[in-house]
Amino acid sequence: MKSTTQPFRSLSPAVMRASTVVFNSLADFARRKERQPDGYSYGITGTPTARELEHRIAELEGGAHCVVTPSGQSALMTTVMGFVRGGDHLLISAACYGALKTFAQKWLANFNVEVELYAPAIGVEIEKRIRPNTRMICMESPGTVTMEMPDVPAVVAAAKRHNVMTMMDNTWASPLGFKPLEHGVDFSIEAATKFFGGHSDLLVGSISMNNSDYYTVLRETQSILGQQTSPDDCFLVMRGLETLKVRYAAQSVSTLRVAEYLEKHPLVEKVLFPALPSDAGHAIWKRDFSSSGCLFSLILKDAPEKAFNGFFDTLKHFAIGASWGGVHSLVAYYPAPLQANRPFPLTDRPVIRISIGLEDAGLLLDDLNAALEAFGRARSEQG
Ligand SMILES: *Cc1c(COP(=O)(O)O)cnc(C)c1O
């Protein structure tokens, strides 16, 4: 094949793969660690493809730095592992992402970290929970599945008075709806798996921040924990980001329509969605957030567990599955015991979580209507 000297330019970022990074001289090789936190010395610390994604996410978050990780969960865990040590006290919302709570309670607690869960809709009262050895407060707004709204600025203000670090899982709103760093949160975490990727086909996480020292610590933590993010997945997230705004806008409109409809349905007890004026967290959402995304939860009228099979198995346009934020609508089921046994429970009833995709909203409403009819039939049959 003839080689060409013509320049090649593409609109698409390059996918660059590497375990080995090569050096020009022995002196250069010997100094390779000095290239961190931004440079390239071995595949584990990242490739130009990962750096490009980090740059784009930092820009979206209004942050100076970003570290990408192989999943949203790894981003949460890496942030905690970077700074929390034995003897420290760690505060986590009872409505934080489940795997973060499990990681803290099953692993960190065994490393002598004092793990304490706090009431998810907390505000300034967090101050009473802060101890001399409190290192970090983990927030999520709204809470996973149950959608409680903490008062993030109040929590941050209390944390700053006591020199405690704060991190927030911002996946629900994405930086299009809320920018944690602008509210003084130290670390903004996204499961890029959700809205950023947008197509339910990858796992990536991100940690964004302003503090350069924190960035250096997290780059080292990411690499020491052996967490490299595939350049192909970084590329797919960048492709997803190209359409994030339009997907987000369209999905938000449909979601609000579906949530408003369901709220009026006689078989629906409660829609958990802070964008609705009836929601307990509405005032905080309205004050701090600029949009409401594609995810909400539902508590149906009391019914035997079997009636829920009628609901789920009738759906044609919604797939049953975990995760959310993609172009396909999804439903997931969180059984009653899971809710009732959580500290600071919101409900002792099953919760249905709904993620609205890009399908026609009318079709989705028809689908939910049919599912609720089946639920109602099963409910009355079982008395
Ligand atoms: C999905 C999710 C995560 C975890 O992301 P993964 O990439 O699946 O590990 C973390 N936080 C929230 C709020 C999520 O919805």
Image (tube, rainbow, N blue to C red):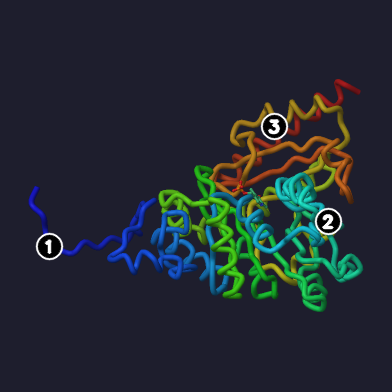
Q: Are the residues at dot 2 and dot 1 in contact (C-beta closer than 8 Å)?
A: no
- Label 1 element class: loop
Mark 1: which amino acid? Answer: Thr
Q: Position of residue 203 (x, y in %)?
A: 54, 47
Mark 2: which amino acid? Answer: Glu
**Label 3, label 1: how many angstroms apart (C-alpha)?**
62 Å
- Label 2 element class: strand
Which of the two labelled residues, at mark 3 and mark 1, occupies the earlier sequence position?
Answer: 1
Q: Is mark 2 within 8 Å of ligand 1?
A: no
Q: Which residue is mark 2?
A: 114
Residue drawn at the location 78% of the way across and 47% of the way down: 110
* Outermost top residue: 381
Residue drawn at the location 42% of the way across and 64% of the way down: 52
**Label 2, label 1: how many angstroms apart (C-alpha)?**
61 Å
* Outermost left residue: 2
Question: How many other residues sit within 10 Å of disc 1, few (<14), some (14-19) or many (≥20)?
Answer: few
- Label 3 element class: helix
Q: Position of residue 101 (x, y in %)?
A: 76, 49
Looking at the picture, tell me which residue is in the foreground, 377 or 218.
218
Instruction: Kindly tell me whether residue 261 is visible in this rendering.
Output: no
Q: Are the residues at dot 3 and dot 1 in contact (C-beta closer than 8 Å)?
A: no
Task: Say if 216 sits above or below 363 in the image.
Answer: below
Q: Position of residue 304 (x, y in %)?
A: 86, 27
Which of the two labelled residues, at mark 3 and mark 2, occupies the earlier sequence position?
Answer: 2
Q: Which residue is mark 3?
A: 370
Residue drawn at the location 73% of the way across and 36% of the way down: 333
- Horizontal arrangement in the rendering, residue 196 relative to residue 346 (left or right): left
Mark 3: which amino acid? Answer: Ala
